[in-house]
Amino acid sequence: MTVDHLRELIATTDTLVLVYFLGLNGFYAMLLVLSVPQLWRHWETYKDEHLTSYLSADSLPPITIVVPAYNMEQSICETTECLLSLQYSRHEVIIVNDGSTDKTLDRLRERYDLYEIPPVFRHPIPVQPIQAYYRSRIRPDLVVLDKLNGGKADSHNAAVGVARFPLLILVDADTLLDHDALIRLARVFLLDPHVAGAGATIRIANGCVIRSHEVDEPRVSRNYIAGMQVPEYLRAFLFGRLGFNPLGGNLIVSGAFGIFRKDVLVEIAGFNAGSVAEDLDLCVRLHKHLLLSKRPYSVPFVPDPIAWTEAPEDLATLASQRERWHRGLIATIWLNRDMLFNPRYGRVGMITLPFFALGEMLAPVVEAFGIVITAAGLWFGIIDWRAGALFLAACWGYGMLLTVASVVLEEVTFRCYPRLRDFLLMILYAVLEPFGYRQLTLVWRLRGFWSAWRGSKSWGVMKRRGFASAQA
């Protein structure tokens, strides 16, 4: 290969990568545009006075809240108390102790005076052996399952057989909900009888002031690692998922806070216990099942119900989390590759899933390849520095502007963070994201390909400080 041929190859490749990122970020911009009218509509119903009619509605569906817990002794009682005290007419809470090796079950026993009940439940989905069922003498709306370790998905499936009510809200044990979150999320089932499941907004609890088991004063963490995730989550939820509502519905209902119809979960055999991205895997199978059944359904994202989760504050934990997320995405796309560009699956097969495959899944590979090609071209003088700057602008600058736009959009609508310093801090984090943080996430996502190739099923370890440490 001559020097001229090499020059032409590098220039062509660099152009293709540039076009890829312009198209990808252009799609993100389209999602942002699509989300704006929906966001304004939801913002109107976000006001407290609009919830009065729902509180008094006899048709408000009863709900079962399911919380898988593994070694959560630091925060399990706070989470349980938060869920039991939520503003809702009729709901129960099921805590599934998934073979914890710490004092998770002991904490619950002491706090809620648990007593064992007979195993009279029928489980429609096979699960790991359940050692005991408990109820509380203090809170009759609390049920605790003690089972052998089988993972988060297995815990969800175990709760399906115990739940009394037709709607299941799935919540992580390190999650706190706003007091009216259930009303805001459940109302979609009153407005649309065809809803099969729905997702809601997840925000970062690190740095917030927590009182009475609820986020009392939302604040942006000054811990750099946790703080960088605040605008990242805003971008992912406020328009990343809201924008998919008119495009066939969401492909992900976050396992940290989402709602599903119990009968649909049973139809698709519940969660896949072998998946490390059980929320994504479940949603894809749910879409697939209902589309093949030719039944009317929707899986919307609802922006105003808010759940607060504890985010990683160290690089090792964050790296493990992001590697697992991407590994789960790769595995799910591969298992459902027959849906890609298949008109049989409607907009999900023609738009949503291809975007996740070509955009979300392949983006780190294309970005890493583009960086290497651009650097080589600049080093050998094959690519002009202006072309390199254009690549960085398309790859990182455009994304940064979309993140800033998400922060501004949150500020003019829900304004969850009322202090000016928090708004400015989010803008600062959004501007700094392309410089170091993005490159780290790129490396972690690339590791996801290697782990997926090796067939890794590891979940990694999530270090938690607990909600008590965040209180002022």
Image (tube, rainbow, N blue to C red):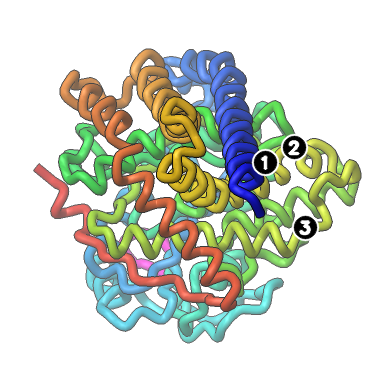
Using residue 65 as the reference point, say whether residue 309 is left or right of it: left
Mark 3 lies on residue: 337
Q: Nearer the viewer, residue 243 or 47?
A: 243
* Quarter of the figure with the C terminus: top left
Q: Are marks 2 and 3 in contact (CB under 8 Å)?
A: no
What residue sits 66% from the left and 45% below the top?
5
Using residue 215 as the reference point, say whether residue 188 is left or right of it: right
What residue sits 67% from the left and 40% below the top?
299
Precedes in sequence: disc 1 or disc 3:
3
Range covered by the magenta-colored residues: 134-142
Q: Nearer the viewer, residue 56 or 25?
A: 25
* For residue 149, above or below residue 351: below
- Residue 101 visible in rendering: yes
Q: Amino acid at mark 3?
A: Arg
- As drawn, which residue projects farthest toward the left? 472
Magenta-span inclusion, residue 430: no
- All told, the count of numbered labels is 3
Figure quadrant of residue 416? top left
Mark 1 lies on residue: 355
Using residue 31 as the reference point, say whether residue 341 is left or right of it: right
Mark 2 lies on residue: 351
Q: Amino acid at mark 1?
A: Phe
Q: Kindly report the distance in space between the C-alpha atoms of the residues bearing marks 2 and 1.
A: 6 Å
- Residue 195 visible in rendering: no
Helix, strand or loop at mark 1: helix
What residue sits 35% from the left and 52% below the top?
440
Q: Are marks 2 and 1 in contact (CB under 8 Å)?
A: yes
Name the spot of residue 385 as percent of width and height, x first. 42, 30
Q: Kindly report the distance in space between the C-alpha atoms of the residues bearing marks 1 and 3.
A: 13 Å
Q: Kindly report the distance in space between the C-alpha atoms of the residues bearing marks 2 and 3.
A: 13 Å
Name the spot of residue 148 as percent of width and height, x first. 47, 84
